[in-house]
Image: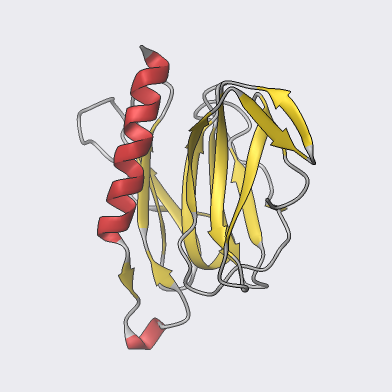
Amino acid sequence: MRRLLKHAFLVVALIGAGLFALPASPASAGYWQQEVGIRNQDGRAEYFSIDSTRHLIHQWEQTPYQGDFVPWRRLSGILSSGIGVILNDNGTIGVFGRAEGGDLDYVQQLSPGGDWSGWTSFAGRIELHSEVTAGVWASDTCTVGGFHIPCHERNYVKVIGTDGAPHYKYQYCVNGCWSPNWE
């Protein structure tokens, strides 16, 4: 049931991200304004956005389903556009965003509801103002580095590269181990 709710909320978050994604105002046209959300392991909603200074910000409910959100708080890192969010199987949240250098960066909670890691680069070059989509992929076999491995459901991130084509990375170990190359 928990996994079903997790997947249902990811779909709602991805659809919501598309509905709330608006171009930045001319005064701050260097980024893409977007808000994405997800439910924590304990049911509290958490939202992420990019503020006018291009910092990743977030807010969360203090009590599940009550709408009692803390004020927006800044996380480390400067993003130029596009964010996506996942819930790992261990209950930690991971956030993706396009860094100033054009690569995809990733930050995650160290424990459910806890502090955040430093940013990790996934390398590659992402098109400016492109959508960053994250979610859960269901498959019987996964291809990682040219090898087929058994898997059932795994997190993924999708971006549009500077070549205009979609590119994917997959999480092939629980809570970590992302595919080494873009597919």
Residue sitting at 33 percent across and 32 percent down?
9
Depth check: 3 or 182 in front? Answer: 182
Whether residue 170 appears in this view of the structure is yes
Whether residue 175 appears in this view of the structure is no
Q: Does 122 sit left or right of 26 as displayed?
A: right
Q: Return the residue found at the far top.
A: 1
In this rendering, the count of numbered labels is: 0
Q: Does 148 sit left or right of 155 as displayed?
A: right
Rendering coords of residue 42 (x, y %): 39, 20
Rendering coords of residue 20 (x, y %): 27, 59
Rendering coords of residue 115 (x, y %): 59, 36
Q: Does 175 sit left or right of 155 as displayed?
A: right
Q: Return the residue found at the far bottom.
A: 26
Residue sitting at 20 percent across and 29 percent down?
66
Which color scheme is applied? Answer: secondary structure
Depth check: 99 or 151 in front? Answer: 151
Q: Does 32 sit left or right of 163 as displayed?
A: left
Q: Is residue 141 above or below residue 130?
A: above
Which quarter shows the N terminus? top left
Residue sitting at 63 percent across and 32 percent down?
110
Q: Is residue 96 above or below residue 111?
A: below
Q: Return the residue found at the far left.
A: 66
Residue sitting at 31 percent across and 56 percent down?
18
Q: Is residue 174 above or below residue 16?
A: above
The image quarter containing residue 146 is top right
Rendering coords of residue 106 (x, y %): 63, 49
Depth check: 79 or 116 in front? Answer: 79
